[in-house]
Image (tube, helix red, strand yellow):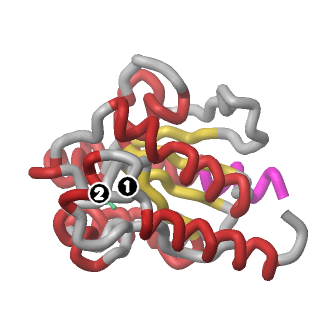
Amino acid sequence: MSGGMDRHQALADLAGRVADCRGCGLAEGRTNVVVSSGPESARVAVVGEAPGREEDLAGRPFVGRSGRLLDQLLDDTGGLGRNEVYVVNMVKCRPPDNRAPKADELAACRPFLDEQLALVHPRVVVTLGNVATRAMLDTKEGITSLRGRSHADPGGAPWPIVPTFHPSAGLRNGARVTGPMREDLARAAELAEATR
Ligand code: URA
């Protein structure tokens, strides 16, 4: 994609298609689709799992408790404030009772995410938690063994993938998880600088 306006229009077009999407059963239960937040020219994209209750009501990703922790961790990472990152989820509609998205739901929604990343073209993609990390790295391995380093995109995209824990795990476990998350986010910020 060349100009910012082309990108802006393409992302606006995508948002319209997401709003009309009935590609899986999650469409039934949604209040709002949750497409993305943050600058379309961001150097870092952060990929979460799925909207929760507050995100479904607001139509914006990571606005609940997990989001507040994510904001804090990002703001503590030099050069990577929440307002600097493009935030998106694996699925755009809230799963009932906050269950994890199912394989068919992830598959139905994946083309939107791929299109978003291709348009934003970040320098680094951070994946939060097992669901996003396994999907993006195309593996069954767990986040604990995958985090702590960057990985090549298995589909051949140019951006490295930096997996870290989901902020909900940080809320449950405190510094044992938020400490490593800070390290991972600092790694992402460094990589985004290095690949200028
Ligand atoms: N958890 C996620 O994975 N995404 C959100 O947008 C909110 C909570």
Q: Report the residue marked by disc 1.
A: 22
> Residue 123: horizontal and vertical position, in percent?
73, 54
Q: Is mark 2 within 8 Å of ligand 1?
A: no
Local SS, label 2: helix
Tag 1: amino acid: Arg
Q: Is residue 76 among the parts visible in the rendering?
A: no
> Residue 181: horizontal and vertical position, in percent?
40, 48
Q: Which one is nearer the viewer's eye here, 157 or 76?
A: 157
Q: What secondary structure do most residues of the magenta stretch adopt? A: helix
> Residue 103: horizontal and vertical position, in percent?
35, 30
Q: How many marks?
A: 2
Q: Quadrant of residue 43?
A: bottom right
* Residue 53, above or below 114: below
Q: Are marks 2 and 1 in contact (CB under 8 Å)?
A: yes
Placement of the C terminus among the 4 image quadrants:
bottom right
From the viewer's perspective, is 169 left or right of 24?
Answer: left
Which residue is rendered at x = 80% and y = 75% of the image?
6
Task: Point out the tag, 2 or 1, that comes first from the N-terminus.
Answer: 1
Q: Quadrant of residue 44?
A: bottom right
From the viewer's perspective, is 148 left or right of 30?
Answer: right
Which residue is rendered at x = 71% and y = 78% of the image?
9
